[in-house]
Amino acid sequence: MDTKDIIYELRTKNGLSQDELAQKVFVTRQAVSRWENGETVPNTETLKLLSELFNVSINTLLGAPKKLICQCCGMPLEDEIIGRNADGTMNEDYCKWCYADGTYTYSDMDDLIKVCIPHMTAQGFTEKQAREYMQHMLPQLDYWKRYEELSDGGEFELFKKQLIDEINELKIEGMPKVESLNALVGKFVNLEYRLPSGMSVKFLDDNTTYLGNQLPCEFDDECCFGILANMDFILICTYEAEGANPELVLYKKR
């Protein structure tokens, strides 16, 4: 679709009149009308406001003229998995797994490759093919080219190490020692737990990126441990294949 059709569709889908949209992005109703008639397109600053208002990328607003890929892992980017800056705006260079709330989550290329390989083998790659592909492709991406400029000097890695130490100190029965934590998006790990009261509850935000891992259970081959954490909490649960029968083991505020 063209920009004029996209803005019209987003405006009507969100139940806004041209006047209401104009007020929200600080333009006149006539400006909105010209956008929707295809006479003009919003300027850069207005596109940023529209992106934030409608929760879509600027690339989408412009009719997706570019094929976006994450400049850290190479994943094709769609609006729902685009990473966020510290102010909540979209950063169209990264996915949520590699960049969350203004923080880069990977500082070691080998660690990223280890995380990506299982996903690629599930799509038909052999482990060797996946590794060789990633080793060739990653150095060509902007994040790794500019790593010295973009890195935080190891601060995020120190935070992950601190979290790992805290989790291991909990000494959860049957849970192996945690060796690493990876970026996990809430939407894909937000299980629903049944409380003793009979109520069911979710603890995560679908749009937030957390740190976590999955570990085998030492006393039940059909069960595994799920670990999720951030600056505010540590959550440990158990579940069966495909997230079935989840049980909350621990929820601890930090």
Image (spheres, rainbow, N blue to C red):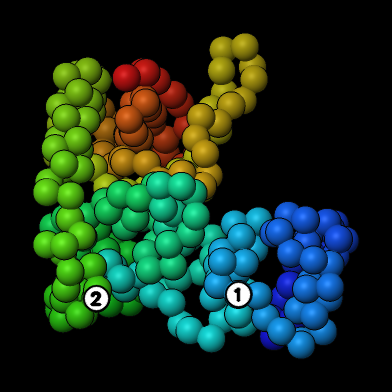
Q: Residues within 10 Å of mark 1 (few under 14, many from 20)?
A: few
Please name whichever residue, 20 or 27, is drawn nearer the observer in this view of the structure. 27
Q: Percent from the top left, x then y, of residue 187? A: 51, 48
Q: Secondary structure at mark 2?
A: loop
Q: Residue at x 84, y 67 (%)?
A: 29
Q: Which callout, 1 or 2, points to the residue nearer the camera?
A: 1
As measured in the structure, the alpha-carbon distance from the residue carrying label 1 to the one carrying label 2 is 28 Å
Q: Position of residue 87 (x, y in %)?
A: 46, 47
Question: Are the residues tagged 1 and 2 within 8 Å (C-beta)?
Answer: no
Q: Is residue 137 above or below residue 101?
A: below
Residue 43, disc: 1
Q: Earlier in the sequence, mark 1 or mark 2?
A: 1
Task: Give the secondary structure at mark 1.
Answer: loop
> Is 38 positioned to the left or the right of 103 in the image?
right
Q: Amino acid at mark 2?
A: Leu
Total number of numbered discs in the rendering: 2
Q: Residue furthest top?
A: 197
The C terminus sits in image quarter: top left
The image quarter in which residue 41 lies: bottom right
Image point (12%, 46%), residue name = 154
Residue for point 37% across, 26% down: 232
Mark carried by residue 159: none
Residue 22 rendering spot, x and y as whole percentages = 78, 62
Q: Quadrant of residue 3?
A: bottom right
Give the residue type at disc 1: Asn
Q: Which residue is mark 2?
A: 141
